[in-house]
Image: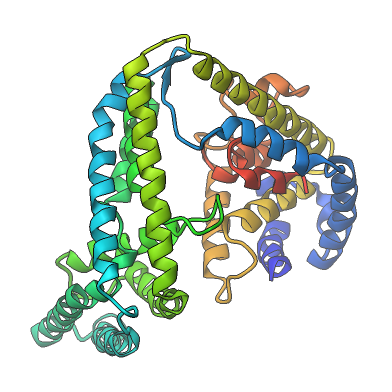
Amino acid sequence: MMKFFLYFFLTPAILFGQEYNFQSSLRSSPSKIIKSYDQVLRKYKKKFCEPGLEKKYDALFTDYQGNGIYIPYINEEIDYKTIRKNLYLLINKKKWIEAKRERLDKYFRLPSLEKGLSKLENLVEKNLEVKYKFDILGMKDSKTINEGKKTFEAIRNFYLNFEQKFFYMHNFGYPVKHLENRKAYEDAKKKGDQQEINRTYFRRKIFEDGAPSSSVYKKDTFPRTIIDTIKLEVLKKQIFVTNNLQYDLDWLMTALPKVQKLGLKHYKRSFKLWEEKVNEAIKFYKGLLSKKKQDSRFARQKREATEEIKKYVNSRLGKVYDYWTERKEIYRSLFALETILFNEVGALDPSGRERSEVIDVVLNRYHNSTYNALDPKQDLVQYLKTKKTDKYRWLNVFLKEREFSFTYYFIPAVINIFC
């Protein structure tokens, strides 16, 4: 499937190669280009995916993560003000988790979702049928509009009752406005206000969360986030189910049966672990506030561990960047695209919709000066042998700071870039 999307990109790219600075000598069939690219890629992996890479990163990540609790800093000192401002949210979150645990204790099994999902699917289909009349058949009369409003209102009314059957998949602060929280964080970064950056990021970590399983790293953050988004969309005054809402509801109808299959014991255990984690964080932050030692040994160790893992990852990414500058433009583009698709979408995308959307985003960024140039202050730049980076747009789009999360030094998926 991944190769199909590389063909999808290559066909127009080869026809209009000048747009992407491809050499005319490479304007041959996509299959030949991909075959030669595979040979280049094998050499790359042999060079960069050496034995012990993951073990080394895991050791650095463990030191960096420590107890896994986020600590905000300003000028290499702990930002106590941000901790104080957000601590009440964590305390409220603990109370919310306790209430959910008490509610789960009243059940012998999780509420059945099968009939509700079937009803929801039927209601969505009715609204989409009216939408087809409106959009495709051009029936834009008041009767069709009223029918659209009525069928969407039916979806809303049913969903607001049905969602209570999977209350254990709701988030703290449900429904959380994740886009607003992310925008506030991005705005703070643009302003360069470190205090506000810390505050908004701390807030995001509290609300953009999930119940942990027995695994240290695995949480159900993603499904909870989607369920937040669905609720916010359903509450909007609209006539028809939007494409995004339809996509999310399709996901919900597939995901909820799997969620229910995990069973009551799973969620009782998960919420217990979640409460323990939040309680641990509350005690930890209260301890920091009570000590207030700006140069505490803990803070110093945390800074040192952060610098070590940043240096390790960025120095290696610098070598990756330099390596691909010495390869042909077409190969750079394929490496950037394939790596982004693998990490942003993954191996499963039956309809191909997500991969198509990601490719569109990358191609748009290639032509946008906001995204196709590295910031000279970006940590990566100091590790580059290549000083004139402007002409390497594909690599810049791929490795520009804060654009693709899997390139962050603190995201374990960064290892995928090398292997």
- Residue 281's image quarter? top left
Could you tell me residue 137's position as x and y percent?
A: 28, 88
* Pick the front one: 289 or 327: 289
Could you tell me residue 115's position as x and y percent?
A: 30, 90
Side of 326 where 75 appears, left or right: left
* Pick the front one: 130 or 275: 275
Question: Vertical placement of 196 versus 172: above or below?
Answer: above
Q: Is residue 365 something that shows in the picture?
A: yes
Tell how many labels: 0
Q: Is residue 193 something that shows in the picture?
A: no
Q: Residue at x 32, y 29 (%)?
A: 199
Could you tell me residue 124's position as x and y percent?
A: 28, 83
Question: Vertical placement of 70 versus 168: above or below?
Answer: above
The quadrant the N terminus occupies is bottom right
Question: Vertical placement of 291 versus 160: above or below?
Answer: above
What's the image's color scheme?
A: rainbow
Q: Residue at x 73, y 27 (%)?
A: 315
Q: Residue at x 86, y 42 (%)?
A: 50
* Pick the front one: 361 or 18: 361
- Residue 142's image quarter? bottom left
Q: Residue at x 32, y 69 (%)?
A: 245
Could you tell me residue 113's position as x and y percent?
A: 32, 83
- Residue 192's image quarter? top left
Side of 322 where 293 appears, left or right: left
